Structures are given as C-alpha cells and as structure tokens.
Amino acid sequence: MPYYVYRIHSERQLEYVDAKDGYRDAKALVRELRAQHAPHDPTGVRLVFAKTTGEAERLLSMPRDERVVGED
C-alpha cells in the first residue's frame, strides 16, 4: 500500500500532492513541503497510509479524537 501526501486547506479541503511506495520517501517529501510552507499560511501537509486515494481522503476527512495523555 502506498503513502499518500495531501495538502489540507481551510475548511478541510484536500489537495492530492503525490503517492510514494516507501515511508522514507514520503516522509522526506512531507518535510520538504513543510519547509517551503510560509508560517502565516493555514495550509497543512499530511501523510496517510491507505489502499486508495478515496480511502486516504476519507481518513483525512474524519475528525480526530482528542488524545488522552494520562489516566484520571
């Protein structure tokens, strides 16, 4: 399964950038895109592991649960 790289614009609009077979190649691309990113620009870059672009977009569109750091 490939690693998909997406730009995430405001209002959760997804823009497909590229797909890489290896994690290292995908992570290097994400780092390069984030380094070119202007600090005031709200666009983000995300990496997702999925079978298809449709599944990748579905995973990126789902709201994420808040992390629980420790027990209460």
Image (spheres, grey):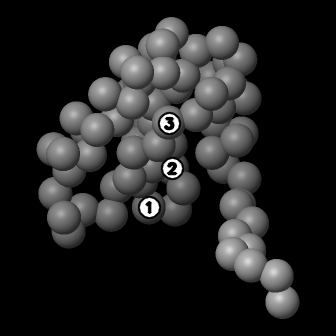
Q: Nearer the viewer, mark 3 or mark 2?
A: 3
Residue 10: assigned label: 1
- Quadrant containing the N terminus is top right
Identify residue for label 3.
47
Q: Secondary structure at mark 1?
A: helix
Establish if 70 lies above or below 31.
Answer: below
Taking the spot 44% from the left edge, 61% from the top edge, the residue there is 10
Query: For residue 59, what is the image quadrant?
Result: top right
Q: Is 33 or 17 nearer to us in this picture?
A: 33
Taking the spot 48% from the left edge, 21% from the top edge, the residue there is 23
Q: Is 54 or 65 nearer to us in this picture?
A: 65
Residue at the extreme right of the image, as rendered: 72
Establish if 59 lies above or below 22.
Answer: below
Q: Amino acid at mark 3?
A: Leu
Residue 13: assigned label: 2
Q: Amino acid at mark 2?
A: Gln
Q: CA distance from mark 2 to mark 1?
A: 6 Å
Q: Secondary structure at mark 3?
A: strand
Q: Is residue 60 left or right of residue 5?
A: right
Q: Is 20 or 17 nearer to us in this picture?
A: 20
User: CB atoms at circles 3 and 2 under 8 Å apart?
Assistant: no
Q: Is 14 or 2 nearer to us in this picture?
A: 2
Q: Earlier in the sequence, mark 3 or mark 2?
A: 2
